[in-house]
Image (cartoon, rainbow, N blue to C red):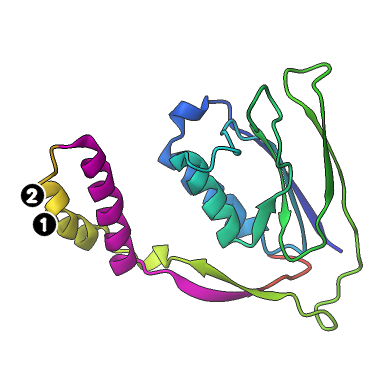
Amino acid sequence: MTFVFILVYRPQPASTVTDMFYDEWADVLERTSAYAGCIIVGDVNLHVDDVANTSTERFLTLLTSFGLRDYAGRPTRGDHQLDAFVSRSDQPAPVVKVAPPLISDHSLIVALFEVTDYHPARTSCRHVVKRRPWRSFNLDAFATDLEESELVRNPPSDVIQLFDSYNCTLADLLDKHAPLRDVKIRARPTAP
């Protein structure tokens, strides 16, 4: 089986997650998630346990869209999970233990995972994920529709309604200009 191990360290605090991080993160996932043995570990400096946080939601959505899953699942620094152990969701789930911090202020993540011989001709590892066609995304058309939206032309004065309007408007425009599509993917022993 061909493995790819990726070590991630995002040094900024969770409050300074930039679009560039997500662009680069998506690029890394696109290049590596097709490997049958894809393991991603490291300090992402996001509160991975706080699914209500928009940065965390975006991070986890990208993982899911590439058929990946975080298996750490518990606090790794203080009361929050800042570290991740990610592997393919269509492979046997690893047994992950998060040990208390000893040398560092982060916990030690120890994982046991099954290494099986992978033969694409004999094994069918196909599954369907939802992806947006970002390569055909027309930013100018999106910006024009955004300028003509109620969010821009007549924004609510109440902050809660403004956030709701923002979320609904952007979700609707994304669904219009880059609708989610079901994509069948198959694990391969290597991805050039």
| Rendered image quadrant of residue 115 | bottom right
Total tally of numbered discs in the picture = 2
Secondary structure type for disc 1: loop
Depth check: give the residue in front, 64 or 137: 64
Question: Are dots 1 and 2 in contact, CB under 8 Å?
Answer: yes
Residue lying furthest left: 153
Q: Residue at x 73, y 23 (%)?
A: 106
Q: Amino acid at mark 1?
A: Glu
Q: Which of the labelled discs sits on residue 153, or is there none?
A: 2
Q: Is residue 183 magenta?
A: yes
Q: Which of the labelled discs sits on residue 89, or is there none?
A: none
Ranked by sequence position, the earlier of labels 1 and 2 is 1
Q: Residue at x 52, y 24 (%)?
A: 13
Q: Is residue 164 above or below residue 83?
A: below
**In-image side of 22 versus 127 (left or right):** left
Q: Residue at x 53, y 54 (%)?
A: 61
Q: Is residue 27 magenta?
A: no
Distance between mark 1 and mark 2 Cα atoms: 7 Å
The boundaries of the magenta stretch are 158-185
Q: Which of the labelled discs sits on residue 148, or is there none?
A: 1
Depth check: give the residue in front, 24 or 157: 157
Q: Is residue 24 above or below residue 81?
A: below
Q: Residue at x 54, y 75 (%)?
A: 183
How far across and how far down the image is residue 9, in percent? 64, 32
**In-image side of 141 versus 78 (left or right):** left
